[in-house]
Structures are given as C-alpha cells and as structure tokens.
Image: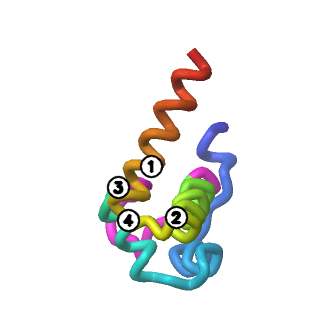
C-alpha cells in the first residue's frame, strides 16, 4: 500500500489502541519493533505500524513475553512469512 494513502495516527491514538500503556509503546519503539522518526510522542504512525504494535501486544500478553522476546518472535514470524512467499 502506498504510504500516502495509509491512515495516520497520533501517539495517543496508538496508545489507546494498545491498552493505554505508554511505557510499553516507547519500549517497543526502543526495541525497534517499529521504526519512527523523532520523538515517539510527536511522531505520526501508520496503519501498518498499528497492526505491528497490536500483533506485538498480543504476543507479549498471550505468551507473557518480555519486549526483547516479543521482538525475536516477530522477527522469526516475519522470516517464516518471507520463506512461505518465496
């Protein structure tokens, strides 16, 4: 999808979509589960980033995974998806 047509969300909207935990969102950004430009609280977020954050949140919650473990699980899932497409 062309990013100019993707939805744009604020930090507060992203936080609300992920159960209201600001510290968790900032930690996920620091672990590079999603990439942003500049300060997390002033950045604009895309629908893709929201989807990735929600997936990370489910993994973290369902498996009681730490943020580094969640990042590793997501990386492995991404690699698996790439292999299946190839």
State the residue at coordinates (39%, 54%).
Answer: 71
Label placed on residue 73: 1
Mark 2 vs 4: CB contact within 8 A: no
1 and 2 marks in contact (CB < 8 Å): yes
Q: Tell me the crowding category of disc 1: few under 14, some 14 to 19, or many 20 or more residues within 10 angstroms, Cα based.
A: some
Distance, label 1 to label 3, CA atoms, is 13 Å
Nearer the N terminus, badge 1 or badge 3? 3
| Residue 33 placement (x, y as % from top left) | 41, 55
Residue at the disc numbered 2: 63
Residue furthest to the top:
86
Give the Cα distance between marks 3 and 4.
10 Å
**In which quadrant of the rendered image does the C terminus lie?**
top right
* Residue receiving disc 4: 67
Say which of marks 1 and 2 sits in front. 2
Q: Which secondary structure is most common in the magenta stretch?
A: loop
Q: List x then y, in percent, for residue 36.
A: 40, 58
Mark 3 / mark 4, whichever is N-terminal: 3
Q: Sequence-wise, which precedes: disc 3 or disc 2?
A: 3
Instruction: Specify few, some or many for label 4: CA neighbours under 10 Å numbering under 14, 14-19, or 20 or more.
Output: many
Above/below status of 26 relative to 86: below
Q: Position of residue 17 (x, y in %)?
A: 64, 74
Front: mark 1 or 3: 1
Cα gap from disc 1 to disc 2, whole angstroms: 10 Å
Q: Quadrant of residue 25?
A: bottom left
> Residue 35 at what x, y percent from top left?
39, 54
Q: Examine the structure image and report whether residue 37 is included in the region drawn in magenta.
A: yes
Residue 68 relative to residue 57: left or right: left
């Amino acid at each position: 999808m062309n990013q100019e047509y993707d939805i744009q969300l604020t930090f507060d909207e992203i936080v609300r979509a992920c159960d209201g935990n600001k510290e968790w969102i900032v930690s996920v950004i620091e672990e590079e589960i999603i990439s942003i430009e500049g300060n997390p609280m002033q950045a604009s977020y895309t629908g893709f980033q929201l989807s990735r954050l929600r997936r990370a949140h489910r993994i973290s919650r369902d498996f009681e995974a730490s943020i580094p473990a969640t990042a590793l699980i997501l990386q492995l899932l991404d690699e698996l998806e790439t292999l299946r497409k190839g």
